[in-house]
Amino acid sequence: MLPRAVKDVRVSSPANARLDSDVIWFCVPDSAIAKVARDLSARDWKKKVAFHSSGVLPSHGLDALRRRGAAVASVHPLMTFVHGSLPELCGVSFALEGDLRATQIATRIVSDLGGESFLLRPSQKPAYHAFATMICPLLVSLLASAEKVAALGGIPATDTRRRMLPIIRQTLKNYAELGPAAFSGPVVRGDVETISLHLKSLRKLPDAKQAYAALIRAATEYLPAKNVGAIRRMLEESTPKKTRRSA
């Protein structure tokens, strides 16, 4: 059963949109938001509410509609949407920014969806969306890179995902319950030689090697670690930063 706030929902394209609803939610690529708003701005927008779903752009992308009388806001669900998957929205956070009336209505809709809303300032949105990108698409990038590393370790590609999922699930469970105390491995122990051996084994995968080294550096900065100085010196020797000339 649909929540009461979303019982009368229609999906439209700019070409066939009637725009007779009280709330219009633009779910288009970031680069298209301002253009679509301009293209539709000749319609009657008085007393209407318009949202866009960009995580990085502020509500200013809908200024063409704001000038026509609409209350506007950016409403971004902190959730991943991919073909073939229908995520639950109960408990999902939604980042809101924009006009007071629009954010108040967005808060009610999010509540009816079972989500939780919070407000951002326009200047905070790029960092917020970088955070969202790190915990979802770049997490997938990390896992895909790990699959390539697993192949170097002799694990067949057909087995890699099955073998990695138990430790991934337990790590997420530990992090949810313990936070940074869930961190384990050679950095916690200060095992410089182990990290060095890892880096040597990744020579055939330079991008994965750079990602590994960057994550080790972050770990020495943000997480419990021993022999931090020695680890950082070894990283500098093993993965020297490119100079502007060499780059």
Image (cartoon, rainbow, N blue to C red):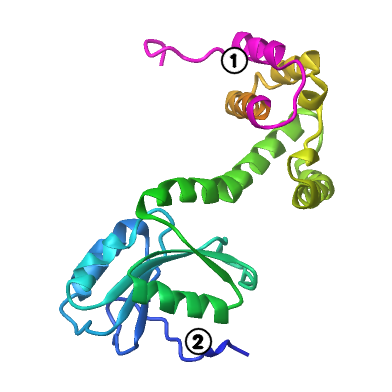
**Which of marks 1 and 2 precedes in the sequence?**
2
Vertical arrangement, residue 10 with respect to residue 41, above or below: below
Marks counted in the figure total 2
Image spot of residue 115 (x, y percent) = 59, 72
Q: Examine the image and state in which quarter residue 62 appears.
A: bottom left
Residue drawn 70% across the image and 37% down it: 146
| Disc number lying in front (2 or 1) | 2
Q: Tag 1's secondary structure?
A: loop
Instruction: Report whether 191 appears left or right of 146.
Output: right
Question: Mark 2 to mark 1: distance in Å?
Answer: 53 Å
Badge number at residue 239: 1
Vertical arrangement, residue 12 with respect to residue 173, above or below: below
Image spot of residue 153 (x, y percent) = 79, 29
Residue drawn 64% across the image and 10% down it: 233
Image spot of residue 70 (x, y percent) = 25, 77
Q: Residues within 10 Å of mark 2 (few under 14, many from 20)?
A: some
Vertical arrangement, residue 18 with respect to residue 227, above or below: below
Instruction: Single out the residue that lies furthest toward the left.
Output: 42
Instruction: Report whether 204 appears left or right of 106.
Output: right
Name the residue type under label 1: Thr
Q: Tag 2's secondary structure?
A: helix
Quadrant placement of the N terminus: bottom right
User: Does 162 lie within the magenta span?
Assistant: no
Residue drawn 65% across the image and 18% down it: 203
Q: Examine the image and state in which quarter residue 90 appears.
A: bottom right
Q: Are marks 2 and 1 in contact (CB under 8 Å)?
A: no
User: Does 235 lie within the magenta span?
Assistant: yes
Residue stretch rendered in magenta on the structure: 220-247
Q: Nearer the viewer, residue 178 or 84?
A: 178
Q: Residues within 10 Å of mark 1 (few under 14, many from 20)?
A: some
Residue under label 2, please give it: 5
Name the residue type under label 2: Ala
